[in-house]
Amino acid sequence: MNDIRREHVESAAQWLAGYDERLTRAAADAKAVSRSLSQVRGSATSPRGEVAVQVGPGGALEDIRLTPAARALEAEQLAKLILATAQQAQRTVGAQVVEIMAGYVGEGPSLDFVKEHLPPAAVREAEERRGPVDDDEYFANPEVIVR
């Protein structure tokens, strides 16, 4: 085999090894994110403690507890209180999802896609938790602006 051909074969083999390594790393990262997301839970309690709820990773209601004080509420008041409390727990889950995904995909179109499918209040809560993006993080993961 001539030297030029050998160089091309070696270069292709190196590229393929690097590509395989990146795929392996991406698969491991995806598994870790999946595990993290499956463990996300959100809890909330109404201001006076009549209602407590827990929601799972997708925001689905998993548990609801009513204290004896809930019996003193009219049905409509109780329904609104349960709904508001569940929404708070869902916002907590959404904020956790944004935090996990930001660590995985960084700022940019992929994270924006995740945020688009969450309640706006959950996104605001996540941004408040994270605080402003510092310059080092911004330049390491610049946002792409498409017009």
Image (cartoon, grey):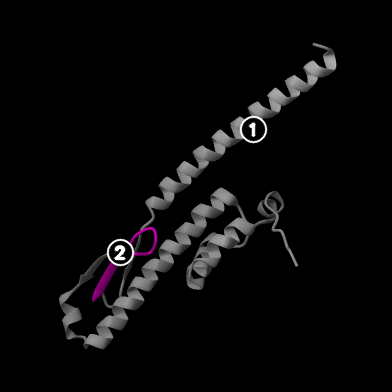
Q: Amino acid at mark 1?
A: Tyr
Q: How many marks?
A: 2
Ranked by sequence position, the earlier of labels 2 and 1 is 1
The reply to whether the magenta stretch includes residue 70 is no
The residue that appears at 84% across and 18% down in the rendered structure is 4
Secondary element under disc 1, as helix, strand or loop, is helix
Front residue of 97/23: it is 23
Establish if 79 lies above or below 20: below
Secondary element under disc 2, as helix, strand or loop, is strand
Residues rendered magenta in the picture: 50-61
Q: Which residue is mark 2?
A: 54
Q: Is residue 46 left or right of residue 125?
A: left
Q: Which residue sits furthest front?
A: 1
Does residue 52 appear in the picture of this structure? yes
Establish if 42 lies above or below 49: above
Q: Is residue 1 left or right of residue 112?
A: right
Q: Is residue 33 left or right of residue 16?
A: left
Residue 5 image label? none
Of the 4 image quadrants, the one containing the C terminus is: bottom right
Categorize mark 2 by other alpha carbons within 10 Å: few (<14), some (14-19), many (20+).
Answer: many
Q: Amino acid at mark 2?
A: Gln
The residue that appears at 72% across and 52% down in the rendered structure is 139
Percent of width and height locating residue 60? 34, 64
Rendered image quadrant of residue 146: bottom right
The residue that appears at 78% across and 22% down in the rendered structure is 8
Q: Which residue is mark 1?
A: 19
